[in-house]
Image: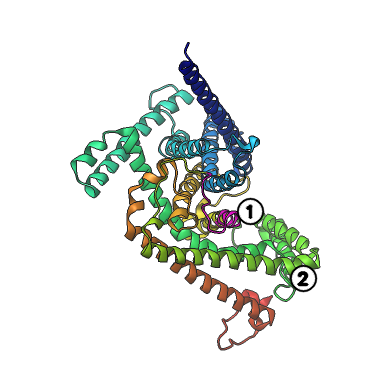
Amino acid sequence: MEAADYEVLSVREQLFHERVRECIISTLLFATLYILCHIALTRFKKPAEFTTVDDEDATVNKIALELCTFTLAVALGAVLLLPFSIISNEVLLSLPRNYYIQWLNGSLIHGLWNLVFLFSNLSLIFLMPFAYFFTESEGFAGSRKGVLGRVYETVVMLMFLTLLVLGMVWVASAIVDNNKASTESLYDFWEYYLCYLYSCISFLGVLLLLVCTPLGLARMFSVTGKLLVKPRLLEDLEEQLHCSAFEEAALTRRICNPTSCWLPLDMELLHRQVLALQTQRVLLEKRRKASAWQRNLGYPLAMLCLLVLTGLSVLIVAIHILELLIDEAAMPRGMQGASLGQVSFSKLGSFGAVVQVVLIFYLMVSSVVGFYSSPLFWGLRPRWHDTAMTQIIGNCVCLLVLSSALPVFSRTLGLTRLDLLGDFGRFNWLGNFYIVFLYNAAFAGLTTLCLVKTFTAAVRAELIRAFGLDRLPLPVSGFPRASRKTQHQ
């Protein structure tokens, strides 16, 4: 063999080893996420649905739970996708020739983006509808009962749903972009059809993030205030403990003497209320035993950090709005070449990259808080060891929609300059200036409005409670009237 043949073989062998290494790394990462998601779902599932007398129902629920675990692992991977890419880029810039990070390269990052895109399509379009129809199916009339009969019915229902959705997407695409080229491209199922369908789902996810994130940013202050110990000026733990003990004693008395009441009692509801009061009392006892540092320093620092992160997010979006008006390069677009490790995506270097990662995680947590705080999705909130299987499926679908839209959401708002990799950058609406500009303006306006309204209302309420003005028998000018429950306390 000639030297050129040996060089070709060595190059092919090197590419083969790189592909095997990337597959091993991707498998290990996904297996870790899968295990974490499985542990989380087993904490929320309802045990009665998996230990029923009917083994068929238990088997169906176990299969549906595994599909939900896969979907939730994909959602968690989509959340970590953009921060992992930003950190990897900074590591490659800082240590370009380090032997121990040779596995971290642009090919691996691009492969992870493509895998997340593929698995997101697979979960949203096939796995989650299959899991829902599978749990609701009973088998065709006249057929033999069993898991296989349910599978046949689920597959038929899934085929009808697929035809319905694909037809709707075809009609929508023909209306929006009515030309011969786009119509012919719809016949390419894999390269265009699924990408267009996922583009529509991603656009809905981005709109959902636009509504949930400002609401969650406002709710983060109250949620954090419930988790941390407030200073004595803002909270009276002794009074709360006494009220909780009195309410628990009253409910216990009603449970022990149900015949003394004229109205029928819901014993299950009363037991749940007693358990909730006991849990609340345990938390109040822990907060009362907190140290002076936690009480006087932790709460103000946490509120200050939340205020700084929220204000910084609004500031970055405002700057991005100005960049959109001046420079066309500020528009989100897809990255075609593997340019990772060549230039930093933050003007502040590694420090700016860390700030970007923190802001992305903060906005994702805020969007989840806002999602479960909204009245439309209040019923989907999971409960500890008391979440039905259909509710778990709905939560996994919603979390996947939110998380898969997070890279597009972050790049559209200008939180990072890392362009979208893989098929995430092929969405047509990302190139529309008016959509991107209005989206940035709406996010900045809604976040500022929610923050000002919630923050000022929270400060006003805490000051009223601290000075005891909420217990006044008459309303004071400029202050809200206290409720009857608060007055009796």
Task: Classify the position of the C terminus by image quarter.
Answer: bottom right
Location of residue 101 by image quarter: top right
Q: Residue at x 49, y 22 (%)?
A: 12
Instruction: Indicate left or right for 12 with 21 as reference.
Output: left
N-terminal label among 2 and 1: 2
Q: Where is residue 225 in the image (x, y as percent from the top left)?
A: 65, 66
Q: In the image, what residue type sits under mark 2?
A: Glu
- Label 2: state its secondary structure: helix
Q: Residue 267 carries which label?
A: 1
Identify which residue, 371 or 432, lies in the foreground.
432
Instruction: Indicate left or right for 4 with 387 as reference.
Output: left
Q: Position of residue 285 (x, y in %)?
A: 77, 62
Q: Position of residue 187 (x, y in %)?
A: 26, 34
Identify which residue, 136 or 154, lies in the foreground.
154
Q: From this view, report whether residue 49 is shown above or below residue 258.
A: above
Q: Residue at x 60, y 87 (%)?
A: 474
Residue 38 colored in magenta in the image: no
| Label 2 close to label 1 by CB (< 8 Å) | no
Range of residues picked out in magenta: 341-359
Q: Position of residue 288 (x, y in %)?
A: 78, 65
Instruction: Indicate left or right for 204 with 89 as reference.
Output: left
Q: Can residue 371 be seen in this view?
A: yes
Disc 2: which residue: 238
